[in-house]
Amino acid sequence: MPFACIHVPNFPVAAVCRAEPELRAQAIAIFEGKPPLEKVFAVNESAGRMGIAPGMTKSQAELCSELTLRPRSLLQESSAHAALLDCAQSFSPCVEDAAADTAIFDLAGMESLFGTLPEIACDVFRRAANLGLDANVAVAGNPDAAVLAARGISGVTVIPTGKEAEQIGSLPVEVLFSHREEEECEKKKEATQLLETIERWGISNLHALAALPEVELSERLGQEGLRLQQLARGRVGASHRVAGAAGFFAESFAGAGLCAVGFARPAHAGVAAHAGTAESDGGRSSIRHWGNSQ
């Protein structure tokens, strides 16, 4: 059963760039907090190359004249998240709101509506771009493999069933430790310690983690270690709630800001509308085919 994942890297920056597209070519840093304790929260690659990093004070970042600073906007992030779900619901009535930057959806039966899996993946990518999202899209035989591929591989990726372990094996182990922002600090601390332990062993990618002996891994890291190993092997590591949703948001644009104004139509209507109309746009998408395409 095929699943797709849409992941928006560096989500706070992406949300700001969605509202102000002209910033995409600039070095950007997002700050949060109350004066005079404002700190950099997120940066794009251009800002990172300038030495700007999360945790710096706003006053330190302001010393870089080529840097564009923007306050974190929860409204813009909410609108970007609504657009992410809108995109997923355009292709399937069964969508999981996995995180602010990630949506998973079931593609079972969708090929008869939208074409082959590679064609669907490219259409999802273009749809996301039309909604102002710089996203990665991945399709795989289970939701966890799709999520890992979308987190770790840029652009569009299609992995045939049975090839999951082979194709995600080169990804760094960090892709296993992407968590919801609202998770408890204690859980985040435990995850950080676990990642540090794995890295101290010299395990740098999923292939190396998958190859560890299960008994010894269980003795040292317990059930959580075995769960991570299952993920590294391209298998399902957790239950998922991929279910039909009531609807999705429409937006209104007001200057540089975005405002989510409410649910517009049922999720299944989005699928029907997308199936009945062909969208044309100037966006381009690159696609990776692993092994034999489905």
Image: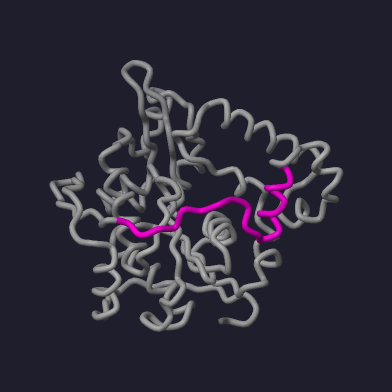
Q: Between residues 174 and 91, which one lies in front from this camera angle?
A: 91
What coloring was used for the rendering? Answer: one colour
Quadrant location of residue 95? bottom left
Q: Is residue 263 left or right of residue 116?
A: left
Q: Is residue 71 magenta?
A: no
In the rendered image, the vertical position of residue 159 relative to residue 174, given as above or below: below
Q: Residue at x 73, y 47 (%)?
A: 226
In the rendered image, the vertical position of residue 111 relative to residue 78, given as above or below: below
In the rendered image, the vertical position of residue 10 relative to residue 236, given as above or below: above
Q: Residue at x 15, y 52 (%)?
A: 252
Which residue ends up furthest to the top in the rendered image? Answer: 36
Which quarter of the rendered picture does the N terminus lie within?
bottom right
Q: Residue at x 16, y 48 (%)?
A: 261
In the rendered image, the vertical position of residue 96 relative to residue 89, given as above or below: above
Coordinates of residue 130 in the picture (x, y in percent): 29, 65
What span is colored magenta in the figure? 225-245
Number of disc labels: 0
Coordinates of residue 250 in the picture (x, y in percent): 19, 55
Coordinates of residue 84 in the picture (x, y in percent): 34, 56
Q: Between residues 191 and 105, which one lies in front from this camera angle?
A: 105
Q: Is residue 244 magenta?
A: yes
Q: Residue at x 23, y 53 (%)?
A: 249
Which quarter of the rendered picture does the C terminus lie within?
bottom right
Q: Between residues 135 and 43, which one lies in front from this camera angle?
A: 135
Quadrant location of residue 243? bottom left
